[in-house]
Image: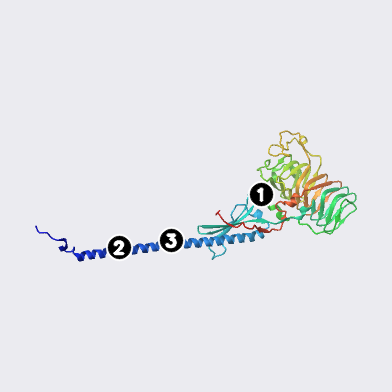
Amino acid sequence: MKTTCRSSIPGFGPHARRGMSLYITVMSTALIASLLGLAGLTIVRIERKQTVTNSDILSARTNAASAVELALRVLANDPNWRTNYTSGVETVPQSLGPNAIGTLSWVLEDSDGSLTDGDTKLRLKGVGRVGNTVQVSSLGFTTSGSAMNCLEVAVCSNGDASFSSSSIVSTDQTIHSNGSVSVSSGGIVNSDVEAVGTISGSGTYNGTTVSPVSARAVPNASVFDYYISNGTYIEYSALPKAGPAQLLSDVVLSPNSNPYGDRNPEGIYIIDCKGGQLRIKCARIIGTLVLLDIDHLSDIEDGMSWEPAISNYPALLVQGGIEFRLTTDGLSEVDRGVNFNPPGSPYQGSTDSDTVDTYPSQIKGLVYVSGNAGVKNGDTVIDGVLVAGNQLNVTSGETLTVTYDSQFFSNPPPGFSQGNTIDVTAQTWLWDAAP
């Protein structure tokens, strides 16, 4: 048999082998070049994505820092920021202009969850957003507003204060008037007295008298804002009728008791009188009662046991005028057939289910009347501060006794502060977690 060498077969000679090797080399080189090209494109895409991400982070951080600066400026120019914002709630994101990138917003936080009471620990968080990137810059801050100096005295009237014959007015501090003070013959004032205008009359002043003095600051209409925002309404028409007035009587009103509807955890209850009269008598109130648009002939009378649910809050806020016709006979459960310290509404820490107790008749707390405040036909006792937005009048034969409580000046309630300085706390800045 004839044997044929492989090298003699066409296509399998030395030249063919060299061509195949060259082909493989070229293809391998092309493949490697392609892979390197693809790797390069991938790296470029990754780097571009990283560049975009880093740019978004930097822009979001700039927005977050701008949010803090804007918020500090807004707060410094908003005396009502405590009621206009809610702790822990972010503001609506906004852009700084048509060409701006991303948005900014901020969050105010008080560690006790409330911006309106005594501060625990305040923090401002600026939030910057660009696309899906969120950055948060935060810092601690304090405030340095001051209490209105009407709370520095036991009684303050923004208008004249007049005390009729046989009236007796007593305080353990000072009576101030942004107008003038007069005491008629037979009237007695057992207090230091100061006035922007004159101090006159043939009555007896058993204390120092100083005039003229500088006017003291009193609240304006915004004093009601916080309480309206946070209070619970009692319908004026839901109260029983008593002649020309509606009557609030023989009830317990407290954070845990409201016979007229929903309860309020801070004991803030609002009655919009819609220009009508209201009589309040023989009741126990543990809370802040806010009376809006009230007729000036409205009154508070007989025995009342009254104090705020939050110690430095007002007991009574009146939009308009009102008369005080209280007595010192006390609030008697026996006479009224009502248990005034039921479970949930203790008196000095105690509750019961009987109707045999008697409570001292007094208003314990801060009382503010935006119009005229009158004392008529009785013995009115206030343990706190009395502020009249207009005139204060005590009629003949009546007594007004005010025992001053300094807590309202040292820790003023919402609506009774002036000045609004925001102070950033040193060494509290940090990048924070996104909301």
The answer to whether residue 47 is seen in the rendering is yes
Label 3: state its secondary structure. Answer: helix
Three-letter code for the amino acid on which mark 3 is drawn: Ile
Q: Position of residue 420 (x, y in %)?
A: 69, 58
Q: Position of residue 191 (x, y in %)?
A: 84, 50
Three-letter code for the amino acid on which mark 1 is drawn: Asn
* Image: 387 above or below 31: above
The quadrant in which residue 13 appears is bottom left
Front one among 347 and 389: 347
Q: Residues within 10 Å of mark 3 (few under 14, many from 20)?
A: few
Instruction: Give the label, 1 or 2, closer to the camera.
Output: 2
Give the spatial CA distance, label 3 vs label 1.
Answer: 53 Å
Q: Residue tagged by mark 1?
A: 230
Q: Residue tagged by mark 2?
A: 28
Q: Earlier in the sequence, mark 3 or mark 1?
A: 3
Label 2: state its secondary structure. Answer: helix
